[in-house]
Image (cartoon, grey):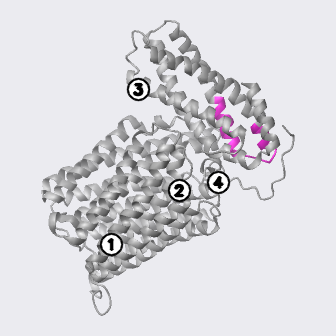
Amino acid sequence: MEYSLDICKTLHSDHMATVRMLEDLEEALSKIGRNTAPNELSPELTNLLNGLVSIMQTEISSHFRFEEENLFVRLEQMGDMPMLSILRSEHDTIRPLAEKLTEVIEALLAGGITSEIWASVYDMGMELAEREVFHIQKEEMGFLPLLEHVITSEEDQALTVAFATAK
Amino acid sequence: MSDQGPELPNFQPEAFPGAILAGAQSRLIPYGIPLRFFVAASMFQIVAWGLLTYGHADVSAFFGGYGVVLAALHALTLGVLAMTAMGASYQLLSVATGVVLKSLLLCRLSSWLYIPGTGLLVSAMFIGNTPVMLLGGVLAVAGLALFGVTVGTVFWQSKSLQATVRHGWVALISMTLLVVAGLSLIVDFNTGFLGVGLLPEHAKLALSHGLLGGYGFMGILVMGFSYVLVPMFVLSPTPNPKLAGVSLGVNLAGLILAIGGVLSGNTAAMIVAAVLGLIGAGIYLHLLLKALRTGMKRRLGLSFVMVRASWGLLIASIVIGGLAAIVPLDFNLLHLFGFILIFGWLLTFLTGILQRILPFLATMHAHKIGRPAPRMSEMGHQNITLKLHALCHGAALVLVSLGILLELDVLVLLGGGFGVVGAVAFLWFALGVSETVMTLYGKEEQSK
């Protein structure tokens, strides 16, 4: 994807990092399996889970909120946008899922590897990966190209600064 | 940021390729319309493999004429391939181009004519009843004509996705020629008017009919849709439309030359046609493989295993077709060519893509009625159904191909059996996804 606006490039960059991380997570979880909790976390898996917690915090606490408070509002000024209701609805589904996943990953990283916690990490991790990647797919193919049509260069500068501050 | 954005008098949110996602919700047609085509296609897939299994001893000996092999071929081409293309086109073209379908009645009417017409035609081909074959053929053609008018209107009005639209026009022209040839072939079973004067012989027209259907109508349509669907699924930039146009031009030249070669009995023309086909398909694959390389998504799942396999089978079909032009009777190359083209490339590609489209549409319908979207991976018992389908489909392709090459009917029988099991698994998947959507709409009705 190639974008001309800085705000789209920044959002795209976030999306790339998130997709990579979630695909790595899916791969790692698939390899281990749901019913075979590891005795201890490998350094690679620990890094991956730490990175995931960090990504979820930036994705959820800044990226989602920034989109909702700045970009969705801006597009809604132009009239009814059915796509935005889909994106909002997905934010509402993904946000609590990510919060719960963060909690169980933190419990896991704190040394509490039980089969129950592992199964929760597996289930929620796989669900988050699927839902978030599909959400990003919609934003990349629909939302960001729409912003490219709508946002002026003056707005672009202001939005880019605002996003950097929000993060 | 400013409170009010600029006025955009010419703003068209659909004027970019990703609008297939952006505008999907507002341009969803009633789920029952694409669903009836997809479920019918899934059922005809069982019929096609079933007939192939039943007629395993006749496959290598088939040189035209009605019977089980002709019925199996048409259960697959009309019953599965064109059926899927109709359902997908009605839904996807509208959201992808941003052109709203003028009349859903035409879509429904086409299904009422086409689905029973195809059933009748396939049954009549099996039992060898020409008048019923003609009746089924006319009904199916009437359904295709309504399809042509509906999607032709979308193509005419579309200002975006020009590569796909250009492919669509070529596919529709091929479809028109295809049905003229098809009806002529049916009439010729009783009248024997072909081969008289300047009219082509039955066998040559039948082969041309197959080329028009495989590469012209379905092949070009599949290529055109690929330029929208593959980038959407892998999250890549849209393939270069100019190169897509070059691919279309070369493929079209190859198709015209191939049909000319078949009708005139000119082997050299058929060989050049195969070379052109390889170049055209090579450009097409170059564009899509680039999309896969540059796409944001790396884990593409089982559906793209099928899609990649189908691309290999596309090339294989052209190579085998070229060889069949030189030595048609050696190793049953002509039969193998037809099998790899239809059951190999086209069926593998369409089932690969359909397993992504069905859950995708289901989530869009959930959003439309304001329900939380179910997880795509949990629809249709995919862990069992799609894996079983892929394994059986692969085994069926290998076994039937070997059976044709080595003239071992038992391998065709075995392969056909695997095909049936895979097709049943695919129907199970399609019904499972449909059930998810029906349940969502049922809950919506109850809540009112």
What's the CA distance linking mark 2 and mark 3? 37 Å
What's the CA distance linking mark 3 and mark 1? 48 Å
Would you name the residue on which mark 1 appears?
B272
| Sequence-first disc among 1 and 2 | 2
Tell me the kind of residue under disc 4.
Phe
What's the CA distance linking mark 3 and mark 4? 36 Å
What's the CA distance linking mark 1 and mark 4? 37 Å
Q: Nearer the viewer, mark 2 or mark 3?
A: 3
Would you name the residue on which mark 3 appears?
A30
- The N terminus of chain B - image quarter: top right
Residue B33: mark: 2
Residue bounds of the magenta highlight: A71-92
Asked if the residue at tag 4 contacts the one at tag 1, i.e. Cβ–Cβ closer than 8 Å, the answer is no
Q: Is residue B400 visible?
A: yes
Q: Nearer the viewer, mark 1 or mark 2?
A: 1
Q: Position of residue B200 (x, y in %)?
A: 30, 85
Q: Is residue B244 magenta?
A: no
